[in-house]
Amino acid sequence: MWSVLWAAVRSKAPYVTFPVAFVVGLVGYHLEWFLRGHPPPSAEEEKSISEQREDRKLQEIAGKDLTKVVSLKEKMEFAPRAVLNRNRPEKS
């Protein structure tokens, strides 16, 4: 008898869980809207993540002189020490 009951529950599970999940999502959406007090901004008003990142990068480099960079000849070591000197003994 139990196997028949479990087979019936297993076969009807999507018909039960979808309405329950729909109601929980609907209640959660309206509860969040009520707690925030205003509707979420529309997609046209909100900037995308890539646009926000570009704006932040432009603000960071706004006051810098980008023509002054250190040449590779002046750098002592341009690769991480762990990559090139892993198996070499330390120079003294």
Image (cartoon, rainbow, N blue to C red):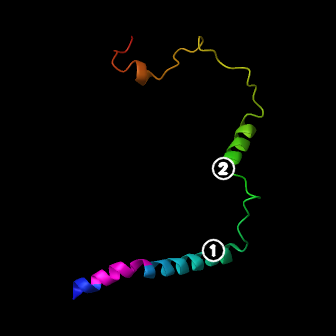
Marks 2 and 1 sit apart, C-alpha to C-alpha, by 23 Å
Position of residue 72 in the picture relative to residue 65 (left or right): left
> Which residue is depicted at the point 74% across and 38% down?
58
Residue 32, numbered label: 1
Amino acid at dot 2: Ile
- Say which residue label 2 marks: 49
In the rendered view of the protein, which quadrant contains the N terminus? bottom left
Q: Horizontal placement of 58 versus 82: left or right?
A: right
Q: Residues within 10 Å of mark 2 (few under 14, many from 20)?
A: few
Nearer-the-camera pick, 77 or 5: 5
Q: Say if 65 sits above or below 11 in the image.
A: above
Measured as percent of width and height from the top left, residue 22 is found at 54, 78
Up-down: is 85 above or below 56?
above
Q: Is residue 13 magenta?
A: yes
Give x and y (percent) for residue 19: 50, 81
Determine the residue located farthest toward the bottom in the rendered image: 1
Nearest to viewer (mark 2 / mark 1): 2
Where is residue 17 shown, x and y percent of the image? Answer: 45, 78
Q: Nearer the viewer, residue 43 or 15?
A: 15
Q: Report the disc number at residue 92.
A: none
Three-letter amino acid code at disc 1?
A: Glu
The magenta stretch is 6-14
Instruction: Return the residue nearer the eye: 41 or 58.
Output: 41
Magenta span includes 77: no
Residue sitting at 68 percent across and 72 percent down?
Answer: 36
- Count of marks placed on residues: 2
Q: Residue at x 54, y 81 (%)?
A: 23
Check disc 2 and report its element: helix, strand or loop.
helix
Asked which secondary structure carries label 1, the reply is helix
